[in-house]
Image (cartoon, rainbow, N blue to C red):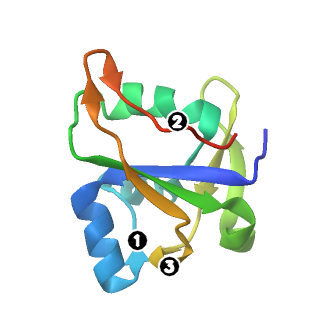
Amino acid sequence: MQTNTIYKICTEEEWAKARQTGTYKGSQADLSDGFIHFSTGPQAAETVRKHFAGQADLVLISFRAEDLGPALKWEPSRGGALFPHLYAELPASLARSVVPLPLGDDGHIFPDMDD
């Protein structure tokens, strides 16, 4: 499912560096895979559970999918769901919002999100 708003989850430190340099080049996992991983609103909580469980320094960054241009591809994951992948560096200036993902008793606490 392709949506207008997509989300990047990364550490506060990674995003602070991106804001300082103007470009997010990706996490270690992104660099290993050759693209920057994003999630849709409905996919984000599962992404955090699978890849960031218990990590306290995360931020959720929203982007408009159309702002990322043709380097954004929607590709199937292991379960067949389509995930947005960016095959380029990410200009930090395209972020629409950046919010912390605090840890609660049952995992990370998400804000209201666009689907």
Tag 2 residue: 44
In the image, residue 64 sits, relative to residue 84, either above or below, namely: below
Tag 3 residue: 93
Q: Which mark is residue 58?
A: none
The quadrant in which the C terminus is found is top right
Determine contact: label 2, label 1, CB under 8 Å: no
Q: From where the camera sits, is residue 29 visible? A: no
Tag 1 residue: 24
Q: From where the camera sits, is residue 96 visible? A: yes
Circle 1 SS class = strand
> In terms of sequence position, does the residue under pointer 3 or pointer 1 come before the other?
1
The quadrant in which the N terminus is found is top right
Circle 3 SS class = helix
Question: In the displayed structure, does residue 34 sit left or right of residue 21?
Answer: right
Residue drawn at x 38%, y 60% is: 31
> In terms of sequence position, does the residue under pointer 2 or pointer 3 come before the other?
2
